[in-house]
Image: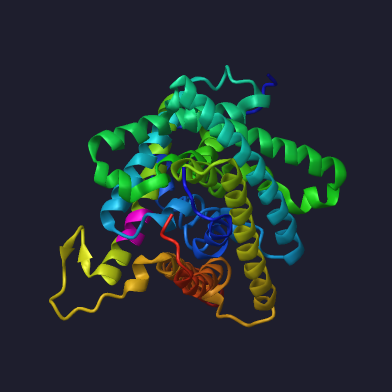
Amino acid sequence: MQDESLYFIFLNAAVVNNFVLALFLGICPFLGVSAKKDTAWNMGLAVIFVMLVSSMSAYGINWLLTELDLLFLRLICYIAVIASAVQLVEMFVKRYSPALFRSLGIFLPLITTNCAILGLALFQTAKEYDFVQSLVYALGAGGGFMLALMLMAGLREKLELARVPSVSQGAAMSLMLAGLLSLAFMGFAGLGGSHG
Amino acid sequence: MAELPNPQENLSLDTFLRGIWTENPVFAMLLGMCPVLAVTNSTMNAIAMGLATTFVLVCSSLLISLLRNWIPKQVRIASYIIIIATFVTIVDYGIQAISLELYAALGAFIQLIVVNCVILGRAEAYASKQRLHTTLVNSLGMGAGFTIALLALGTVREILGSGSILGVALFGEGFQPWVVMILPPGGFFVLGAWLLLFNWLRLRKERRVMEQSGVAANAG
């Protein structure tokens, strides 16, 4: 059991070890749906929701598998639960907001293969957080993901108005931007908190 | 299951080479970026990650290709993920048994191979439609392409960031390592630089083709 304060866990997951910019988790949606701010916002909400659900389930599964001594099944169970949670979100979004469903496109089902979510489940297990700590950790990680996504979307909206050399158009430019953002986030390392 | 017109690809050299150059998972399709950026701070990590991913890719593609007529369409993605997760668990325990040091260096990213889009992408786009031997060759090519991309990043970052390659120091005492290159921002910068290089090559080739056809049109 860890005795880190909840505030510290939240801050650590959201900025110091930002899932996208410091731990390289969830790069695909980060580059894929960061072209528009409102899409990025909705994507962020969906990811936070899936993170909360899978964090809770992962806590339960881990307890159950430890009791049953079946730890080698952990990875398979986690991914199955995440896939079901994503399916749930997908049905919900499709039912209540078809427009949003279209704008998120392929990236909605792809939340399943968003490593940030599986990463979250694995990290919280490795760090032995209790139930409340896990939830706060998930909230922090989701918030951090959203923060990075929104920042990137804002930058890219501005970038569309700028003239860049034709060689660097597209992914190369986005990566350079992401590098600069990541450089900026390194400044938060001084707030404390070890890696991971 | 509905009979879809599935052209079975014939085995050729291109089946293998495509994964390395024209459809390179990292440089051409931008798939599986997370491990590409996260574990390439040294050459050794890059090699290990490349091999582990290739193993999972080849094994799961083979199994999916074998079972392609038995997996119902509706639950195919879930089945693929379970198959992939099984092989990743094998790799996870395997690496833990072979080298604990390597296991610590790669950390959670071994288990995160499950969510590497390259593997699921191959399963959905190729292995679920093609015969066993073409799948084997194609997934080997993709794995090789992925490993080469990891190496391309890993070597550059290790040389710039630690002044060594595979742990052997390259420069003298006076070398001041460019530390940021082995830190997270370096991953973005080096990958961005590689993409710039490929873009530049592609544009130059297009221009040459244009010029040549222009010359031919003028002569004719």
Give yes or no for residue B206 being in the magenta stretch.
Answer: no
Q: Horizontal placement of B82 versus B76: left or right? A: left
Q: Residue at x 47, y 47 (%)?
A: A2
Name the quadrant of the N terminus of chain B: top right
Q: Residue at x 60, y 60 (%)?
A: A144
Q: Kindly indicate the quadrant of the structure image that contains residue B171.
A: bottom left
Count of numbered badges drawn on the protein: 0
What x and y, as percent, mark residue A93?
Answer: 80, 44
Q: Horizontal placement of B203 versus A135: left or right? A: left
What x and y, as percent, mark residue A54?
Answer: 62, 39
Is residue B8 something that shows in the picture? no
Q: Viewer-proximal residue, B6 or A170? A: A170
What x and y, as percent, mark residue B21?
Answer: 41, 53
Q: Which residues are magenta?
A: B149-154
> Where B154 sits versus B173, above or below?
above
- Magenta part, dominant SS: helix
- Scheme of colours in the image: rainbow
> Where B28 sits versus B114, above or below?
below
Name the quadrant of the C terminus of chain B: bottom right
Residue at the top extreme of this rendering: B70
> Where B87 sits versus A188, above or below?
above
Residue at the right extreme of this rendering: A96
Q: Viewer-proximal residue, B53 or A181? A: A181
Is residue A69 something that shows in the picture? yes
What x and y, as percent, mark residue A173?
Answer: 54, 72
Q: Residue at x 47, y 50 (%)?
A: B25
Q: Horizontal placement of B42 versus A34: left or right? A: left
Q: Viewer-proximal residue, A161 or A149? A: A149
> Where A5 sits versus B144, above or below?
below
